[in-house]
Image (cartoon, rainbow, N blue to C red):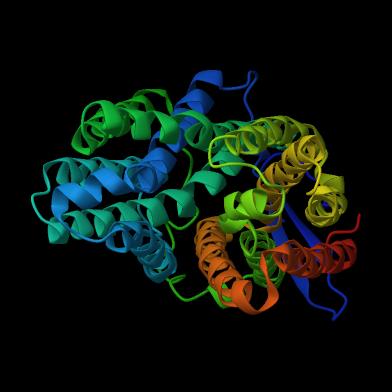
Amino acid sequence: MHFARSAPGKRVSTALPAGDSVELVSSEAQSTDRFPWAAMAAIGFTVFATVTSEFLPTGMLPNMSADLDVSTSQIGFLVSVWAATVVLTAIPLSLTTRRFSRKSLLITSVTLFTVSNVMASLAATYEVLFASRIIGGLGNGMFWMIATGYVTTMLPSQWRSRGFLFISAGANLAFIAGLPLGSALSAISDWRSAFLIMTALTLGASVSLYFLLTPVPNPHAENSEERHSVLRDPSFRMVLLCVAGVFLVVGGGNLFYPYIAPFLIEVSHFTTLTVAAPLAAYGVGGTIGIVVAERLGRNPHKLSRNLAVAILYMASMMVVLNLVAGTQPAAIVAVALWSLGFAVTEPLFGQYIMELASPKLRDFAGAMRTTAWNLGIGSGSFIGGVLLVPLGIAALPYLGAGVLVLGASVAIIARRRERALFAN
């Protein structure tokens, strides 16, 4: 990626093909002499606590269903309503909260997670539990609209990939450790205890953010006339293009991912017990992937190229998994390699969008990204479920890989455009 370079805080004008011009404001003024390990650890811990809170019901379906006397599908819907709340509120929240302190909003978003967990732990009825998930969804949308932009603004360019590593590590750890621990706790004690523990964790996350996080400047704080300037932002089109890529990649991956366990049981002939081996391999692959993503993200000039390669790699691994599914050891390795590809792609997309977005568009870009992410999860899993019966489960990896190729095409198109927009 060929960004115009300047001294810290200096404005740079670059020529556009159509004869217009765009001003990019360097955020290097936020540079510090040392990497803020404590602040980034606080963000990573917060991501772990919030992602675990989001998906906690998936590991406790039977217990919650029996205790509240509702169907399993109704408990499963608690995850869906959370995602729907994010889709409906993230972008409006980014527009209505533009002039508030970024740090205060980040802490407020985590406080909403705490309120949600308290309500869930005390819920006597399904309706109260349902309301708690809406509140949590509001916090989730607010958190992700700010978090990636916050890290981008706080860190100079040479450290941003490391910052995104903390975000990815927190999310990955939630799936590897947080969710299984919640499920085990609900089996040993009860599901309310799991939500009480998440209350303590999210409260602790808020405190750590308050004391450890460095405040960042808000580019909207002093200009009250920019409420409706999003569409006129010179970086909006490129960001929108990449957000479409996020939707395609997440949607393509989720055409197959929700059905990975049935696929492994039906096609690879794992049992309900031994299927834990490839699922554990998925977590291992994801852990390796976020480390690889940090290295690939160190050079912002190559982000779009590395992103396109990572998406194509992920698509190829889905095809390979289907081809070797009949051999269990090979299937385990293929699952890990596929997970590695997704773990590389997700943080690279987040970093790339934040690098493209102007400082004034970062929160809105974060809101669009989390909206596209949740839409991709919902639409991908829905389409996969619709096609599952007529085409068979073995067709899903191929279909998902096809959608991923479209996502890689978006990254390639973005790379060609960025050369014209940000050439030295």
Left or right of 392 in this view: 420 = right
Asked if 101 appears above or below 79 in the picture, the reply is above
Query: In the orientation shown, which residue stands out farthest toward the left?
Result: 124
Quarter of the image where one finds residue 360: bottom right
At x 52%, y 74%, the residue is 229
At x 10%, y 55%, the residue is 125
Quarter of the image where one finds residue 197: top left
Give residue 295's position: percent from left, percent from top: 79, 32
Left or right of 84 in this view: 239 = right
Foreground residue, 404 or 372?
404
Quadrant that contains the C terminus: bottom right
At x 39%, y 69%, the residue is 92
Left or right of 41 in this view: 326 = right
Asked if 45 appears above or below 372 in the picture, the reply is above
Q: Is residue 340 visible?
A: yes
At x 63%, y 18%, the residue is 34
Quarter of the image where one finds residue 184: top left
Give residue 139's position: percent from left, percent from top: 33, 51
Foreground residue, 171 or 160?
171
Give residue 263's position: percent from left, percent from top: 65, 55
Foreground residue, 48 or 89?
48
Give residue 304's position: percent from left, percent from top: 82, 54
Q: How many numbered badges does the structure rendering display? A: 0
Q: Is residue 156 visible?
A: no
Foreground residue, 48 or 277?
277
Left or right of 10 in this view: 107 = left
